[in-house]
Image (tube, grey):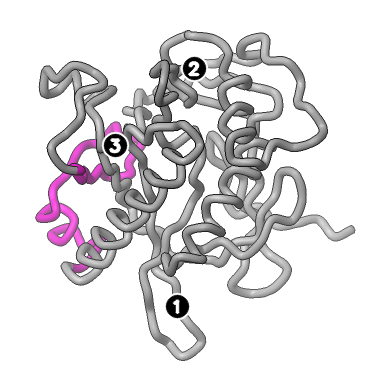
């Protein structure tokens, strides 16, 4: 088998050159981070995120939201379209939590009067700072039309996913989206949802108990991370038949610099 060309390796995923131009293989790792200072390994997380993201991306496509997802290849890999990533994380907040609660002094769990959109510049060196639409257009990261498209897609995806999760007893507290420019053979460009959708990039609380079933369990040293991800997969009906190993805490922990605001959210 020919050795695949590595394109990029991040904390949670590895990107390889795909089988043909315009396609990329996205490999899900087991690593999980707390900021940029600590990275641990949770056995089986990559498998679960691959299954969960496939399911959610497919559902979004079915309701008319364009994404880069093509198909799942195996337990850890997906085939996705090559897109030009816009260097901005788009966070949609439905209920106060995390850094939002800290910044505004709002108790976690407080419903917001309307969904709030926040933008964060994707810069590890600068700590992923909060930015405005004016920053985004001034620095050329996206055009005003791009922002309009991103805002519309983010709100549509948030509304759909909120309902989907509610149907399986989960409340979508907030979610981080990434978007990219996809260029068609005709030269036409359109904005599509990229990256992944998993408990790594959103907050999910049980509707009845408010139990956290997302990455906050790792960020806050709550334990039971793999079990939480498995529970999300189980409720969505995508839990792999082959069980992943029992989570016993990070098996690898090392320091990284510089510090980054990794909170999704």
Residue found at the far bottom of this picture: 186
Q: Nearer the viewer, residue 52 or 77?
A: 52
> For mark 1, what is the residue?
183
Which residues lie in the magenta part?
A: 115-143
Image coordinates for residue 199, horizontal then vertical, percent: 49, 33
Image coordinates for residue 116, horizontal then vertical, percent: 18, 42
Q: Is residue 51 magenta?
A: no
Image coordinates for residue 10, horizontal then vertical, percent: 53, 40
> For mark 3, what is the residue?
128
Q: Residues within 10 Å of mark 2 (few under 14, many from 20)?
A: some
> For mark 2, what is the residue?
218
Q: Residues within 10 Å of mark 1 (few under 14, many from 20)?
A: some
Question: From what the image shows, is residue 236 above or below residue 223?
Answer: below
Question: From what the image shows, is residue 151 above or below residue 197?
Answer: below
Q: Nearer the viewer, residue 4 or 12?
A: 12
In the rendered structure, which disc, 3 or 2, sits on the residue that comes first in sequence? 3
Question: Viewed as shown, does residue 67 lie left or right of 117?
Answer: right
């Amino acid at each position: 088998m020919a050795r695949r060309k590595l394109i990029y390796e991040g904390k949670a995923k590895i990107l390889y050159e795909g089988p043909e131009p315009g396609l990329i293989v996205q490999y899900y790792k087991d690593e999980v981070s707390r900021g940029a200072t600590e990275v641990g390994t949770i056995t089986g997380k990559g498998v679960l995120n691959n299954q969960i993201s496939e399911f959610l991306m497919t559902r979004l496509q079915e309701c008319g939201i364009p994404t880069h997802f093509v198909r799942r290849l195996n337990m850890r890999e997906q085939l996705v379209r090559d897109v030009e990533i816009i260097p901005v994380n788009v966070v949609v907040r439905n209920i106060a939590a995390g850094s939002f609660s800290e910044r505004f002094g709002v108790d976690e769990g407080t419903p917001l009067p309307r969904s709030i959109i926040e933008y964060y510049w994707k810069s590890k060196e600068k700590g992923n700072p909060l930015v405005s639409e004016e920053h985004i257009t001034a620095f050329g990261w996206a055009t005003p039309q791009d922002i309009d498209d991103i805002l519309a897609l983010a709100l549509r995806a948030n509304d759909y996913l909120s309902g989907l999760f509610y149907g399986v007893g989960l409340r979508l507290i907030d979610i981080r989206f990434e978007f990219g420019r996809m260029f068609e053979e005709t030269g036409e460009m359109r904005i599509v949802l990229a990256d992944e959708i998993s408990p790594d990039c959103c907050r999910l609380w049980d509707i009845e108990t408010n139990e956290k079933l997302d990455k906050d369990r790792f960020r806050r040293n709550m334990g039971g991370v793999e079990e939480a991800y498995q529970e999300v997969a189980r409720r969505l009906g995508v839990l792999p038949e082959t069980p992943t190993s029992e989570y016993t805490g990070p098996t690898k922990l090392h320091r990284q610099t510089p510090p980054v605001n990794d909170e999704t959210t």
